[in-house]
Image (cartoon, rainbow, N blue to C red):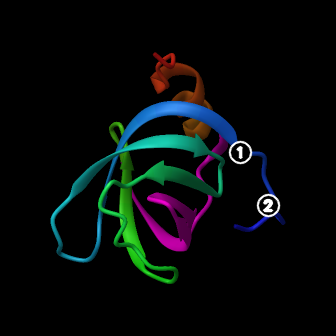
Amino acid sequence: MDETRKTPRFEISVQGRYRTGTGVARDVPILEMSEAGCRFYDRFGRLSPGAEISVRIETIGPIVATVKWSEDHIIGVQFQQPLYGPVFEHIRQKLSRPKE
């Protein structure tokens, strides 16, 4: 896991989806997010560091991202282009649901 993060990461509860190339889309809960990337739970846990994926966060996306790490079904990805500030704030403040 990369501790040299350039932007703060926030705990959120948002539904996401990722796809590798032309593969099947997989629904995943997004657990943390920053303008530069996110962390999500993938029960299949088959993503390897360096893999390129496209991510949707609720209705936002696709966002091209690179897998940075994978540990115990938790995946950390870095977006190829950071999210635009107001889009990130919209996800964080409006789309994120309270944890149950």
Q: Who's the residue at 44% across and 33% down the image?
A: 14
> In the depicted view, which residue is nearer to us: 12 or 73?
73
First to last magenta residue range:
61-85
How would you rate the neighbour count of disc 2 (Cα within 10 Å): few for under 14, some for 14-19, many for 20 or more? few
Residue 52: x and y, percent?
Answer: 42, 77
> In the depicted view, which residue is nearer to us: 70 or 85?
70
Left or right of 99? Residue 84 is right
Residue 18: x and y, percent?
Answer: 32, 58
Q: Who's the residue at 60% across and 45% down the image?
A: 33
- Marks 1 & 2, CB-CB < 8 Å contact: yes
Q: Quadrant of the C terminus?
A: top left
Residue under label 2, please give it.
5
> In the depicted view, which residue is nearer to us: 92 or 12?
12
Residue 4: x and y, percent?
Answer: 84, 66
Report the residue that reaches farthest toward the bottom.
50
Residue under label 1, please give it.
9
Residue 71 disc label: none
Q: Quadrant of residue 62?
A: bottom left
In the depicted structure, whether residue 15 falls above or below residue 75 = above
Amino acid under disc 1: Arg
